[in-house]
Image (tube, rainbow, N blue to C red):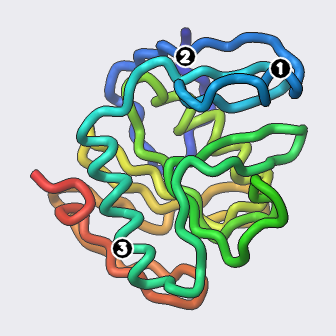
């Protein structure tokens, strides 16, 4: 599968793209009848099936990010793989999401202040290109892209429906402070992606 051309400003795509995602046309009712594993998302009348299991590095990064956010935002919900309704009848399940208010029902419908994806080789272009565009259009406040393979964290801020880079962390610049929902978040690459 070719890598789409629209990569958010400042985000690297230099790791080879390996896409063992399956896309299958199906109705919403058929989607709801699927088992919870493997992880599935519903986009444009297709189920997007995440075939590869989550790696240890992916799980560790997501867990550490959840711990950081839960500590700094005790009044918010910090959730993993919860459905987020987006424009054009799309349901995505971000790796990590900060929610200001609990949703009515099973899925988040109000734009959250933050969505974060931990990139895997199997989901690289989906996370960096497709989801980035959908999250921006859906009014998500910030999008954090955590990349264990490249050892980077990109913090993107939604400005009028387009992503602007707020911070890029890597091993040469491992720390940054980012304002999120009125709180200054101290980000340290070494805590989220330990060597």
Sequence-first disc among 3 and 1: 1
* Cα distance between the residues tagged 2 and 1: 18 Å
Secondary element at image label 3 = helix
Sequence-first disc among 2 and 1: 2
* Relative horizontal placement of residue 17, taking residue 113 as reference (left or right): left
Q: Nearer the viewer, mark 2 or mark 1?
A: 1
Q: Position of residue 138 (x, y in %)?
A: 79, 54
Q: Picture quarter containing residue 26? A: top right
Q: Residue 184 versus residue 78: which sits nearer the camera?
A: 78
Which class describes the residues within 10 Å of circle 1: few (<14), some (14-19), or many (20+)?
few
- Residue 30's tag is 1
* Relative horizontal placement of residue 28, taking residue 2 as reference (left or right): right
Cβ–Cβ under 8 Å for marks 2 and 3? no
Q: Position of residue 11 (x, y in %)?
A: 45, 45
Q: Nearer the viewer, mark 3 or mark 1?
A: 1
* Residue at 88% in and 20% down: 27
Sequence-first disc among 2 and 3: 2
Secondary element at image label 2 = strand
Q: Which residue is mark 2?
A: 21
Q: Position of residue 66 (x, y in %)?
A: 41, 65
* Residue at 30% in and 62% down: 64
* Cα distance between the residues tagged 2 and 3: 30 Å
The answer to whether residue 168 is above or below residue 130 is below
Q: Residue 128 versus residue 68: which sits nearer the camera?
A: 68
* Residue at 60% in and 21% down: 49
Q: Which residue is mark 3?
A: 68
Secondary element at image label 1 = helix
């Amino acid at each position: 599968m070719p890598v789409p051309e629209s990569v958010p400003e400042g985000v690297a795509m230099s790791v080879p793209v390996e896409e063992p995602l399956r896309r299958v046309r199906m109705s919403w009712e058929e989607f709801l009848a699927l088992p919870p594993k493997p992880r599935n998302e519903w986009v444009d009348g297709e189920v997007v099936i995440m075939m590869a299991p989550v790696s240890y590095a992916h799980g560790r990064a997501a867990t550490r990010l959840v711990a950081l956010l839960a500590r700094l935002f005790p009044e918010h919900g910090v959730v993993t793989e919860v459905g987020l309704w987006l424009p054009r009848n799309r349901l995505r399940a971000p790796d990590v999401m900060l929610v200001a208010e609990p949703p009515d029902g099973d899925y988040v419908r109000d734009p959250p202040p933050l969505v974060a994806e931990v990139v895997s080789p199997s989901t690289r272009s989906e996370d960096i290109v497709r989801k980035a565009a959908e999250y921006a259009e859906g009014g998500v406040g910030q999008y954090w892209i955590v990349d264990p393979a490249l050892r980077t964290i990109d913090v993107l801020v939604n400005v009028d429906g387009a992503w602007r880079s707020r911070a890029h962390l890597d091993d040469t610049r491992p720390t940054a402070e980012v304002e999120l929902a009125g709180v200054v978040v101290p980000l340290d690459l070494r805590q989220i992606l330990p060597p």
